[in-house]
């Protein structure tokens, strides 16, 4: 009798777990549909987009920019990124890391972690166990990225975009919420952050039409994807542009709908930085968001409160 009771209890638990999983999938699908529908149907006169440039390790400054925007209650509807900017975009908006977690990652990250991970990729996992231990937080974060998507987003972000470079065509390739062409977010982000000569390009086949692509560092052809953020489906009407590239090059034209932010990072290189410099880069990102910039951005959102 007791065994039968235990058996029924175990069966009930399995059924409950199955129902929970089904409800979770349904909730995730509803969120994904909601993100795509909002991008397609929202009639708001203001859709604020945040553009995060490439820049290697200098990309830590994007976290400081985000901190300031969030602390000053700036609503961020859309985030797009290239290379280092794609990493911050994905981990904040798609994985759902908090800003505190991103800052902690900057504190704990070491250049040797990147080199160990690079060797792991080049050896195709033949020394996976050993090299993973030497790669710091990278393996854990990559595992989290594998389950993230373009559609299930966090922190009230409605859409994201990733810029890559296609070696075959020699042109940029863009993937976004509502226009991911069936490509996994993790593949797009890994490709966008594949620093040439360190990481090999990533071959993918676009599921939507079967096109073969060889994707690599988005910074090669579009390190500051401003036009991408303005185009459908993301269609940002107003842009905050965080530019941490070593050489700025192209800058968006100054107008009332664009705020350009350029942190000062004299001691932070793209692939090398002294100890504690990434934390300093976060601070410089915060400092670069001036009172004048915040005043302009708040002016954009004033009409939404009326």
Image (cartoon, rainbow, N blue to C red):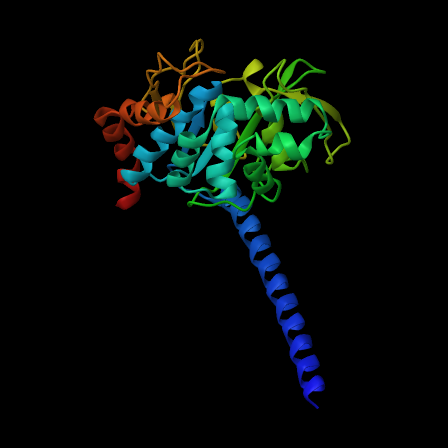
For image coordinates 70% across by 91% down, the residue present is: 1
Quarter location, residue 165: top right
Give left or right: position of 131 versus 101.
Answer: right
- Look at 44% across and 11% down and name the residue there: 250
Q: Quadrant of residue 289?
A: top left
In this orientation, does residue 235 appear? no
Above or below, 281 relative to 12: above
- Image location (x, y in percent) of residue 77: 42, 39
Q: Nearer the viewer, residue 75 or 243?
A: 243
Identify which residue is drawn at 62% across, 62% down: 21
Where is residue 47 drawn, in percent x and y?
Answer: 40, 36
Q: Position of residue 31 (x, y in %)?
A: 53, 52
Relative depth, front residue between 190 and 253? 190
Name the residue at the front extreme: 130
Residue 185, how many percent across, how many down?
61, 36
Residue 5, above or below 25 = below
Evaluate whether residue 50 shows in this view.
yes
Q: Quadrant of the C terminus?
A: top left
Q: Going 61% across and 35% down the picture, which residue do you hit?
A: 186
The image shows a total of numbered marks equal to: 0
Q: Quadrant of residue 11?
A: bottom right
């Amino acid at each position: 009798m007791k065994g039968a009771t235990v058996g029924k209890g175990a069966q009930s638990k399995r059924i409950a777990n199955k129902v929970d999983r089904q409800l979770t999938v349904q909730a995730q699908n509803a969120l994904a549909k909601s993100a795509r529908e909002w991008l397609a149907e929202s009639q708001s006169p203001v859709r604020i987009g945040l553009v995060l440039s490439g820049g290697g390790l200098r990309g830590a400054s994007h976290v400081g920019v985000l901190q300031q925007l969030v602390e000053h209650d700036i609503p961020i509807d859309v985030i797009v990124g290239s290379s280092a900017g794609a990493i911050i975009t994905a981990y904040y908006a798609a994985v759902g890391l908090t800003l505190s977690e991103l800052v902690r990652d900057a504190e704990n990250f070491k250049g040797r972690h990147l080199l160990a991970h690079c060797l792991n990729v080049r050896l195709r996992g033949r020394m996976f166990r050993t090299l993973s231990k030497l790669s710091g937080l990278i393996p854990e974060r990559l595992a989290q990225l594998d389950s993230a998507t373009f559609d299930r987003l966090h922190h009230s972000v409605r859409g994201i975009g990733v810029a890559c470079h296609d070696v075959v065509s020699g042109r940029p390739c863009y993937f976004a919420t509502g226009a991911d062409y069936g490509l996994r977010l993790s593949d797009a982000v890994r490709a966008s952050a594949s620093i040439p000569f360190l990481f090999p390009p990533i071959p993918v086949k676009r599921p939507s039409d079967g096109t073969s692509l060889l994707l690599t560092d988005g910074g090669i052809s579009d390190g500051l994807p401003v036009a991408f953020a303005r185009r459908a489906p993301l269609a940002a009407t107003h842009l905050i542009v965080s530019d941490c590239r070593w050489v700025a090059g192209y800058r968006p034209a100054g107008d009332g709908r664009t705020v350009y932010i350029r942190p000062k990072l004299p001691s932070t290189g793209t692939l090398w930085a002294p100890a504690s410099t990434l934390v300093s880069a976060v601070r410089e990102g915060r400092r670069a968001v001036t009172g004048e910039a915040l005043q302009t951005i708040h002016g954009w959102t004033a009409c939404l409160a009326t």
